Image: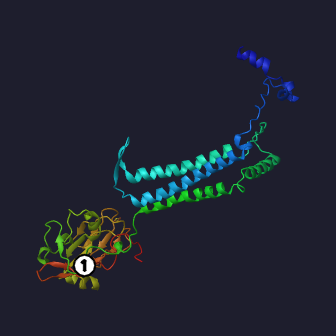
Amino acid sequence: MSSQEISEESLPSEQDTAHGKAVAESPFANPGLPPHKPRIQDIDERAAKRSERTVALLFTISMLATVGFIASFVIFPVDKIVYVWPLGHVSATNLSLGLTLGIALFCIGAGAVHWARTLMSDAEVADDRHPIEAAPELKAKVMADFAQGAQESALGRRKLIRTTMFGALAMVPLSGLVLLRELGPMPEKKLFHTSWAKGKQLINMNTMQPLRPEDVAVGSLTFAMPEGLSEEDHDFNNKIAKDALMIVRIQPADIKDKRELEWSYDGIVAFSKICTHVGCPISLYEQQTHHVLCPCHQSTFDLSDGARVIFGPAGHALPQLRIGVNGKGNLEALGDFAEPVGPAFWERG
Ligand code: FES
């Protein structure tokens, strides 16, 4: 039969549609519902009990898996590698976290499905299609159906299922909570201090030798780091990002800031090399004006006036390190910086 024939023979005429005959004379017979077969749980209370225990067991396994997730997070070091056939060498932490979380979620889903298939109401319901827009009566019916469904789920009567289900649902989010530990340890007081301490010699970062006052000429710019720090150290980059110093020599008469003069040695001043805007290393020195310029966003600091900001987005002067000379004639720190270096503390407490 061609599509043309179908459209001509099967489609209702305009007149039929107008009188509502199109629905009544549908060419498709209503197949109806197959005969209802009661489930074993509907006719045998012992089978229903068995299903109840199965659902409770699945929820209990989910709870145990969540406990396993938390335990494996604590027990396995991050770098622990194990051999598991057929996966080969895998991270013990990743494997155990994935397995336990997968089991916990799967068992909640499997428990809910088994519960619905074996214990919840098995009444078969047929409903005609309706317009998409729901009528108020339909909405009321939905709410009534929902309430009836809640009642038929026997949540109130099956206390074992209810308790274990709420337990499993309440415990699964704990897996996400323990992952917060991966945000890293609290910085505590670490950001307030650098490696500088009283008596630590200033090491010239070019020669890697202790810096002496006669090595620092007026108008020159020298970079220094604390003695004991080595580029071979595993945390060298972290430390130098806070410890790096700029050393310049200014005629004492040209130093305008009183504290800067007190913390200097014979016109030699030591300032943090880390820009207080967003932490770039500063390296451009203008010897006539004693200005240093940060190449990132052009913040400019006046090293003859407490390294105060004279231009750009930086919000704070560069911290100064108090220095002196030890018995060997080398420059040394007389303590740590008096304030955090860099931009880590925007308002400095
Ligand atoms: S980091 Fe120095 S000006 Fe922005």
Q: Which residue is mark 1?
A: 197
Label 1 environment density (alpha carbons within 10 Å; few <14, some 14–19, many ≥20): some
Residue furthest right as drawn? 19
* Quarter of the image where one finds residue 347: bottom left
Quadrant hosting ligand 1: bottom left
Foreground of the two, 314 or 209: 209
Q: Residue at x 25, y 75 (%)?
A: 196
Compared across the picture, whether 239 is left or right of 130 comes to left
Q: Position of residue 312 (x, y in %)?
A: 36, 68
Q: Is residue 190 above or below residue 2?
A: below
Residue at (25% x, 78% y) in the render: 197
**Residue located 70% across and 40% down the image:** 40
Q: Residue 211, position in %: x, y? A: 14, 74
Whole-percent x, y for residue 327 in the image: 12, 83
Residue 338 spot, x, y in % from top left:
31, 80
Q: Is mark 1 within 8 Å of ligand 1?
A: no
Considering the image in quadrants, where does the N terminus appear?
A: top right
